[in-house]
Amino acid sequence: MARIDLDLAHAYRANPQRDEDYALLPLKMSFVDGGAYALLGPSGCGKTTMLNIISGLVRPSHGSVSFDGREVTALTPQQRNIAQVFQFPVIYDTMTVAENLAFPLKNRGVAPDRIKQRVGQIAEMLEMSAQLDMRAAGLAADAKQKISLGRGLVREDVSAVLFDEPLTVIDPHLKWQLRRKLKQIHHELKLTLVYVTHDQVEALTFADQVVVMTRGRAVQMGSASDLFERPQHTFVGHFIGSPGMNFLPVRGVGIGSSDGGRDGSRGVIEVAGQRMASPNVALAARADFKLGVRPEYVTLAEPGAQGALQAVVTQAQDIGTYWLLTVQVGGQWLVRARLHPETEIPGVGDNVWLNVVGSHTCYYQDEELIS
């Protein structure tokens, strides 16, 4: 396995001048030896470009790629010793499952006894031991993709195994099983794995570290907890979660009193046009910025409660394990709250008060986290 270091940018057109000209904007990133990573983002954000640069299928237009401190920018995938699993199965239909799994090892002159042992080990991990003597042509799409996964995992000497949305062709009820298997295989074999997906559930359940990407930019790398609790960019807050983070406009008012003087002077902010005490004086001194809060941390407050936002209910959905309440603040900003299923839910059109400022609240300026 290898540590992978990227210090690069990539444009498919000559002489890029603007950010829009780049498939990957300048970035510096490292994948540690034996780590499990996911590249997560919408279509066209640069995930596959980054994966193909790591593998050597694409050479970056600017910068370098290093494996264990050795520059490999000009090397082919074979020279980099990379295994790559693509979106659609890449197998030999005329071969048996065992022959398909053994093929990468035979090409490298591995001893027959070791091939048999390794093929048996990978087949057992993928729960394909009973299918080893079956021809691949007669198998279902999910089984063929498991063979493709196995061909990527069977070699013990690879620098990394790269997955480009490998579960796209798999039926939804089988995806969870395969993600679980990949996670188990990673723990057993200690491989360096990089997994491309647009599905946040796949990314967050498979990877130890997730790289969230948008418009050619890697905006945050972190654990599932990091991305959920402290999104470093508003895109991460929006993209991660179901539903995503709520955002409201904030204006710093400065030093004053938000409650008629009862609590004395303090920082004051204006959230969606409603004044309240600031969590810190520094925020009250800023110009326009944004408040971000997860629906899980929005709660109902008593009518007229200090520091609560007044809103009007527009929708209440019973999801089963929780209520999803949608309200409108200031006549134009929507806020969603995930409430306990036993919560007494107000009706559409009712006035409510919401707690949105607390320890889980994030603040953003120019889309970047500031507090």
Image (cartoon, rainbow, N blue to C red):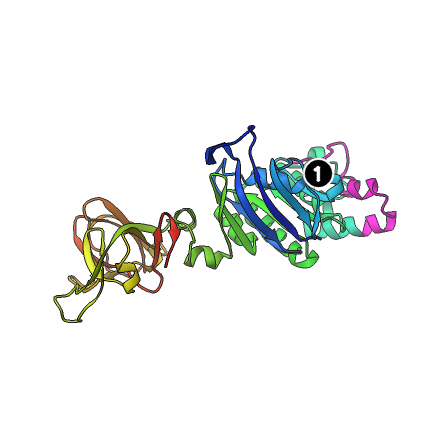
Q: Is residue 268 visible?
A: yes
For the point 56% across and 48% down, the residue is 28
Q: Amino acid at mark 1?
A: Ala
Q: Judge left or right: residue 246 versus residue 272.
A: right
Looking at the picture, how far across and down is residue 280, in whole percent? 29, 65
Q: Nearer the viewer, residue 108 or 344?
A: 108
Q: Which residues are magenta?
A: 89-117
Q: Quadrant of residue 81?
A: top right
Q: Is residue 319 visible?
A: no
Q: Quadrant of the C terminus?
A: bottom left
Looking at the picture, how far across and down is residue 69, in whole percent? 69, 52
Looking at the picture, how far across and down is residue 167, in whole percent? 58, 42
Q: Which residue in the protein does label 1 denote?
A: 74
Q: Is residue 364 magenta?
A: no
Does residue 352 lie above or below 139 as drawn?
Answer: below
For the point 87% across and 48% down, the residue is 111
Q: Nearer the viewer, residue 109 or 270?
A: 270
